[in-house]
Image (cartoon, grey):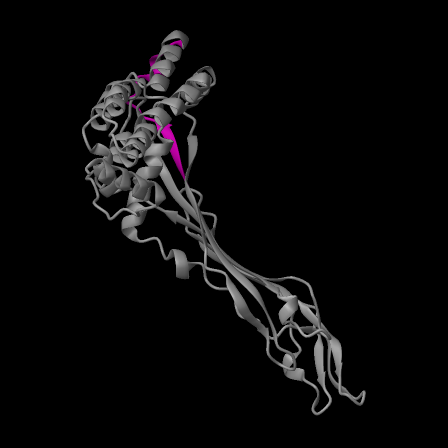
């Protein structure tokens, strides 16, 4: 096993500026665009998940052209393909998204197991039927005020109607889901590895725009607009193999097909436990502050598999996009090209779930969670 690190750096297109009092300024001869990249990886060692860190920065700055003359026609200043003065390094996206802590890695490992588990159902029919019984009571409890009607209507949509519509759409694809499940079961029965992938979410944050951003202060003052954006995308993979104690290899085609249908619908013993938890009052609130539901889904082993090589991947980016304002640019200066800089970090972690004990944590109250809490508060008035 050896660790490999590579670097790539490019610089292109230089320019200059001229001051009649000092001549050409060599300090301002620099790049307009370039690429910087490092990769920290492991060569070989394919039996485990190897850590990976890729750090890439790109810059693209506009250039200035134009000449300024005095009233008597004497040349004062001149730009000849001169890069703009303000050329910062791209911000590190980790400054906004932070590092993935060990506790977060453990929680995400459980989530990867839960969402890639080949034993989890395509549609949990028992859970859907159990939640459907709550819809009439929610409708009957609509308040008399407009606020209470809106709150009750949102909760009905969030917890009953929308999940039911989602399950109906999934049922339309039931035949395809069963066929895919049969293919996966055959692969496992033949002692081949099943590699599964799941999405762990994408986030975008746009910082408040700056409308008086200073691009250039040397010889000419140029201001404009600046927008800073951060993105984060996470996903996970896991490999599954048939366990030696599994009954899957002894099943014929008819038994295998029936088993695939039960798995797809959620008619299994373990799914009964998941249904009982989902129908427990306020279990959704408990899952906000712990991973009980995730652990129940992750430990579903109706097929009889062993997991390995849980990998967590993340790509985070930061981009600054700016444009000069013509109203704040001297008429004798021409600004050509885009002003765009950014940094991309690609990370891979080997993660392992801890012992199956619910992990408490403080949830991130996004717009969806805040709207639910606001609706519940409105109904208590």
The picture quadrant where one finds residue 224 is: bottom right
Question: Magenta segment: does it hold 246?
Answer: yes
Question: Magenta segment: does it hold 133?
Answer: no
Question: Residue at the location (47% across, 48% down)?
Answer: 44
The picture quadrant where one finds residue 207 is: bottom left
In the picture provided, is 347 more to the left or to the right than 374? right
Residue 43 or residue 203, whichever sits in front: 203
Question: Residue at the location (65% across, 72% down)?
Answer: 329
Farthest residue, direction bottom: 21
The picture quadrant where one finds residue 222 is: bottom right
Q: Percent position (x, y) of residue 53?
A: 45, 55
Up/down of 194 relative to 340, above or below: above
Q: Do we see residue 55 in this rendering?
A: no
Up/down of 59 relative to 178, above or below: below
Up/down of 127 relative to 317, above or below: above
Image quadrant where one finds the C terminus? top left
Residue 303 or residue 60, whichever sits in front: 60
Farthest residue, direction front: 145
Question: Residue at the location (27% across, 46% down)?
Answer: 363
Q: Percent position (x, y) of residue 22?
A: 69, 91
Q: Give the range drawn in magenta.
A: 236-252
Q: Percent position (x, y) of residue 79?
A: 72, 77
Q: How many numbered discs, if any?
A: 0
């Amino acid at each position: 096993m050896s660790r490999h690190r590579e670097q790539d750096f490019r610089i292109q297109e230089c320019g200059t500026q001229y001051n009649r009092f000092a001549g050409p300024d060599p300090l301002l001869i620099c790049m307009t665009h370039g690429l910087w990249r490092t990769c920290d990886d492991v060569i070989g060692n394919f039996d485990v998940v190897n850590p990976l860190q890729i750090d890439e920065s790109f810059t693209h700055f506009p250039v200035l052209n134009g000449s300024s003359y005095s009233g008597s026609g004497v040349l004062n200043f001149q730009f000849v393909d001169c890069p703009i003065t303000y050329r910062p390094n791209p911000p590190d996206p980790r400054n906004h998204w932070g590092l993935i802590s060990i506790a977060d890695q453990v929680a995400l490992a459980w989530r990867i197991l839960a969402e890639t588990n080949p034993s989890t159902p395509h549609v949990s029919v028992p859970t859907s039927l159990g939640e459907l019984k709550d819809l009439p009571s929610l409708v009957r409890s609509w308040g008399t005020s407009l606020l209470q009607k809106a709150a009750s209507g949102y909760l009905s949509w969030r917890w009953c109607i929308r999940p039911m519509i989602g399950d109906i759409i999934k049922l339309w694809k039931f035949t395809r889901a069963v066929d895919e499940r049969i293919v996966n079961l055959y692969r496992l029965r033949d002692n081949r590895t099943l590699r599964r992938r799941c999405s762990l979410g994408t986030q975008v944050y746009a910082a408040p725009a700056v409308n008086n951003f200073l691009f250039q202060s040397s010889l000419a003052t140029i201001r404009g607009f600046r927008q800073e954006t951060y993105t984060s995308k996470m996903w996970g993979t896991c490999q599954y193999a048939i366990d030696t104690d599994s009954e899957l290899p002894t099943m014929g085609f008819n038994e295998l097909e029936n088993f695939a249908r039960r798995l797809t619908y959620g008619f299994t013993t373990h799914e009964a436990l998941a249904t009982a938890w989902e129908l427990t009052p306020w279990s959704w609130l408990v899952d906000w502050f712990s991973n009980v539901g995730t652990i129940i889904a992750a430990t579903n082993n109706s097929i009889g598999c062993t997991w390995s090589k849980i990998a967590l991947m993340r790509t985070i980016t930061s981009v600054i996009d700016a444009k000069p304002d013509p109203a704040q640019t001297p008429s004798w200066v021409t600004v050509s090209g885009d002003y765009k800089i950014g940094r991309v970090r690609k990370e891979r972690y080997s993660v392992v779930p801890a012992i199956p004990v619910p992990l408490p944590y403080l949830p991130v109250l996004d717009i969806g969670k805040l709207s639910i809490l606001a609706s519940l508060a409105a109904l208590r008035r």
